[in-house]
Image (cartoon, rainbow, N blue to C red):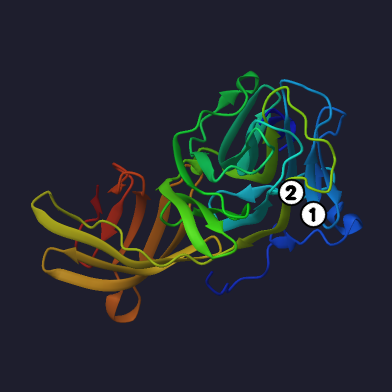
Amino acid sequence: MATLLALALPSPKIWALEKWEGSDDFSSASVSNTKWTQGKSSAKRDASWFEQKVVYTTTVPDSDNSAAWAWGGPKKMFSVSTFRSWEISCEALYPEAGPSANLSDAVIGLSVGWFPNQKAYRAVYGRIHVSYDAFGNLVGTARCESDFNFELRASSMGGGPAEEDGSFPTGYGRFGLKLRHNALTQTDRFEVMNLDSNEVLYSRTDTSTLSLSPMCGVAFFMELDDNRIWPGLSNNMAVDNWKMEAFTPDPINLNSKTSISKGVNYSVAVTNLGMAGAKLSGTVALTVGSASATLPITGSIDKNGYFALAAKGTGATKGYGCVLLYDVATGTYRPNKNTVTAPKQKAIKF
């Protein structure tokens, strides 16, 4: 992970293609060179283009055996909003015969990171590990790890510790990796697929902490056991068929709010809240005393990761409206940040 840290690191869409969306099948070295910020190469380790893939080599034993490519480049990775919904994916390929015996950790993974300064970073990742036995053959069981904690860490710490792991059959050593960030539900999902059978081998969905930073960069990385080598042979482990794309999440309902303010009953219920690009839209049902109305509501995600929503009635619903600030992580409205209005009623604040 240290090289990664050193980097200055599907539903139909209804908005224009973003500059950070795209794919690379690595069919052309010259094209790939325009799409990536590549980690520094050395005799110790390298992730490099070879035969329409990105392959890993390390020829000098070293305690740091990690190499990475960050999406966007060649000199600067893309800055991607954590308040958008998107996913990254690639193929992870391992040879049936490795270059040497008793390799316990041949690693390929996906990472989301941000580097506010030279001394600190944020990163989450999902990665798979395969092993090679005493005869240099691929071991029949692989394992995976993931860390969804985007907390700020000192750069000297290296990669964050794994929070969850799993194991599955190695098969022929061909895996699909996917890391999906859903800004509407504020969850992340890491998925591993067997590319020969299209079977999902492992899937973890958990609460996202990416909103701790408004921006991030994305990458793939490869690693090997400390102080081992993997010479540049035709049977290298490799990454192929990269993709990053935005997606439209399924709509959600927010938890309703019902209470009493100065003797007046009121309720707020936001339903069918969807996300197109960075914009939120849905429906809100308001009740104040005996009066009620249903209005369209719109908004966006603010710098703290909260849903900032507003609605204003017109015509028959004139005078009704609301301004809301909702915390998806806790499923509650932020205290003293919400206002509901209705005709011939004092504004209700909660």
Q: Is 165 in front, or is 347?
A: 165
Query: Outermost residue toward the left?
Result: 263
- From this viewpoint, is residue 188 visible? yes
The residue singled out by tag 2 in the image is 238
> Residue 38: image x %, image y %?
81, 42
> Residue 140: image x %, image y %?
55, 46
Q: Is 283 in front, or is 158?
A: 158
Quarter of the figure with residue 76:
top right
Q: Is 343 in front, or is 42?
A: 42
> Residue 263: image x %, image y %?
8, 52
Can you tell which mark lies on residue 71?
A: none
Whether 322 is drawn above or below 75: the answer is below
Earlier in the chain: of badge 2 and badge 1, it is: 1
Whether 8 is drawn above or below 329: the answer is above
Residue flagged by tag 1: what amino acid is it? Lys
SS under mark 2: strand
State if disc 1 and disc 2 touch (CB < 8 Å): yes
Which residue is found at the position 82% from the left and 27% from the top? Answer: 44
The residue singled out by tag 1 in the image is 53
